[in-house]
Amino acid sequence: MGLVKAIPLSNHLVVEIWDHSRAIATDTTKVELSIKINVAVNKEYFDNPKHFDIVLRVFGQEISYEYKKERTFVDRNDKEKVFNELLNDFTKSTLPYIEKPEFPSRFVLSKLRDIQKRPHRYGNLL
């Protein structure tokens, strides 16, 4: 289906809600909710300017936070109901955390920690 809606948050992030559901058979559907949030890599998140440069080199100006939930073999008549259940679960459990003012900096700094912990994943970018 595509983009369902975009929700601006108080911490200046925008939550994009995507529906990637598709038919599996005549009467069944794979229901897939996908959430995408682009988080800017800001210099003020870092104590060390070299760390900012590393994250910028590896990820660029923005890092995408992604969340996916799916259910397979859903009766096609229940597709909307199941999609809304998945969305409500995200809204109740994860959205309050993402909306916190410190989420963008914590998310970006978690990527720095991943680079430091697993440099082999980033190969020639370091």
Image (cartoon, helix red, strand yellow):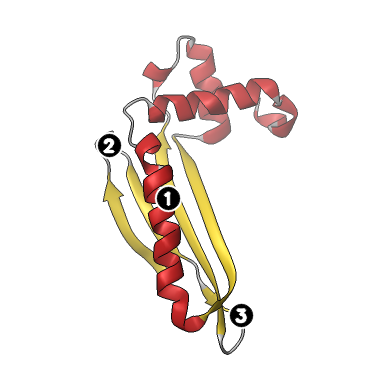
Out of 57 and 72, give the one closest to the viewer.
72
Looking at the rendered structure, the secondary structure element under dot 3 is loop
Q: Which mark is residue 12?
A: 2
Q: Which residue is mark 3?
A: 24
The residue drawn where x is 43% and y is 29% is: 41
Secondary-structure class at tag 2: loop
Sequence-first tag of 2 and 3: 2
- Marks 2 and 3 close (CB-CB < 8 Å): no
Location of residue 90 in the rendering, given as x and y in whole percent from the top left corner = 42, 50
Q: Type of residue at label 3?
A: Ile
121 displayed left or right of 35:
right
Residue wearing tag 1: 90
User: How many numbered discs?
Assistant: 3
Q: Amino acid at mark 2?
A: His
**Disc 1 to disc 3, C-alpha distance:** 24 Å
Q: x and y percent of residue 29 in the render?
A: 55, 77
The foreground one among 44 and 25 is 25
Precedes in sequence: disc 2 or disc 1? 2
